[in-house]
Image (cartoon, helix red, strand yellow):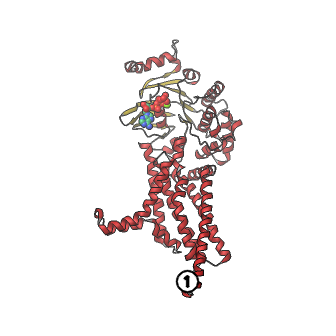
Amino acid sequence: MRHAGTIAGRELRSLFVSPVAYAVLTLWALLGAFFFLSTLVQFQEILLRMQQFQMFDQLRQMNLNDALIEPFFQTMWVFFLIGVPAVTMHLFTADKANRTEELLLTSPATIWDIVVGKYLAAAGFMVLMVALLGFFPGLLFAFGDPEVGKTWAGLLGMVLVALAYAAIGLFASSVTSNQIIAFFLALMLIVLFLLLSLIGDLGAASGFFGMGESVAGVMRWLATAEHFSRLTQGLVETRDLVYFAFIIGVFLLLTKASVESVRWR
Amino acid sequence: MIEARGLSKRYGDLLAVDDVSFVVQEGEVVGFLGPNGAGKTTTMRMLTGYLPPSDGTAVIGDADIFEQPIAARRAVGYLPETPPLYPEMDVQGFLRFVARLHDVPRREIRDAVDRALERCGLADVRRRVIGALSKGYRQRVGVAQAIVHAPPVLVLDEPTVGLDPIQIREIRGLIAELAAPRDGEPAHTVVLSTHILPEVEAICQRVILINRGRKVVDRPLAELTADGARLEDVFARATARDADAEEAEA
Ligand SMILES: Nc1ncnc2c1ncn2[C@@H]1O[C@H](COP(=O)(O)OP(=O)(O)OP(=O)(O)O)[C@@H](O)[C@H]1O
Ligand SMILES: [Mg+2]
């Protein structure tokens, strides 16, 4: 596993001399600032209107977590759909272009070391992105009193969803030698996971392909949104943590199999 | 030190390497010859663990490439046909990475990198970004990454391609020196492929010639050129026709 650390360090250093890393981080910060402000403005408008119409019950229920931080995270999550594949697309494709694949695969590092090393680099970048985002809700603590636990749960949700997407992106970069194809394949897989619950619902309702309620149930479980939403609502539940661990594990194993298959072809 | 046992590689219908066996002794420098597409690179890829053989196996040191793949890979320094380089890294950063990847102890990395830089004439460009180097310098970095961890076995696929005459002489000198070191260091075992026949005459003790995936010549250089024969003629005869090839093998 020491080799994984060596490979992760190299990947991270290479990522930070590439324009992609800075472009993604800059865009991410700008989008974060923009949507944070617009959510804040909306929040204040709602407050104002509630006061105007003397809706004191609702007003008492308004809080920063549910009305501001949660929608903010839900919005920013959408940008992971593009941001994460942009960061992961080069992970294996670059090694094919540079022929460094041959260096890695003939070194004492195992394929698992290589896969985990590259994943750790991507994961590190994802944590950095979410930490950057944490700055905005952090501001609220200076002016109001959001719940600490709920805010952390939301950030955890953001990290986990980014880590899951990074595993998907890593896999996509391992099956092709073209960065652009890797990008779109990752995007497609991520969207597929979003739509799974919809497909499950449709299938169960129409009985399409003889899809029973149990298959539909599995598809709904595999869909990302519900697990993510519970975390942004401040609910940290084991079943959702298991879900993200499952997605990450499956895609790392798929990546390993895909790298191995190159040798056996 | 290196033993190939019936190595074969099949790409779909094409039998790129066909039942190739040979033994390379410790400290020996063997020249791997053959026309384009003969199967030299494919054979080297199997020896280094990049490609699994379709049939047969190889033993590096004491390690079988199937049974102890990590030990086998650890013993080899490999310069592939296209030098494997990260263009965005600087030369010494890259060599440090390769040294670490090959388990050079942390304390020895600096010395190992310095020695490889010096041996390959790279000391002046150690801080340059690899992508900005000329082709010959990139080739030198390729050689440096193969020797940086001082492996007992070197597999070099056309090591002097693209180098200037001075550097060719230096790399040849380096290979000879690695195979028979003066200062009591352990001798390296070297397999190198090349299309430059004088190179073989300059540094190799033995010639293995393959044609269309099959080994057709495996003899000491001295024997091949004993009666004043030119290596070029040996090469031409061995690769001229399959019938001739069979004869040369027998
Ligand atoms: N990945 C591959 N898929 C299919 N065929 C391949 C592949 N790699 C090599 N070959 C074929 O295998 C044969 C041997 O190729 P190889 O690269 O080993 O030759 P070589 O002796 O190194 O030639 P050269 O002197 O040109 O470097 C060739 O016919 C080549 O087309
Ligand atoms: Mg070749």
Which residue is at the far right?
Answer: B124
The image shows residue A47 at horizontal and vertical percentages of 59, 80
Chain hosting mark 1: A
Instruction: Identify which residue is drawn at 67% across, 76% down.
Output: A143
Decide: is A64 above or below B3.
below
Inspect this view and state whether residue A106 appears: no
The image shows residue B84 at horizontal and vertical percentages of 56, 39
Instruction: Identify which residue is drawn at 59% across, 36% down.
Output: B142
Residue A223 placement, left or right of B183:
left
Q: Quadrant of residue B190?
A: top right
> The residue under label 1 is which amino acid type?
Gln
Instruction: Identify which residue is drawn at 60% across, 81% down.
Output: A48
> Dividing the image into four equal quarters, which quarter contains ligand 1?
top left
Q: Nearer the viewer, residue A117 or A176?
A: A176
**CA neighbours of label 1 inside 10 A, class few (<14), some (14 to 19), many (20+):** few
Which residue is the site of mark 1?
A: A61
Residue B20 placement, left or right of A233:
left
Circle 1 — which element? helix
Decide: is B246 above or below B190.
above
Inspect this view and state whether residue A205 appears: yes
Which residue is at the far front?
Answer: A52
Q: Nearer the viewer, residue A125 or A27?
A: A27
Q: Nearer the viewer, residue B43 or B104?
A: B43
The image shows residue A240 at horizontal and vertical percentages of 47, 69
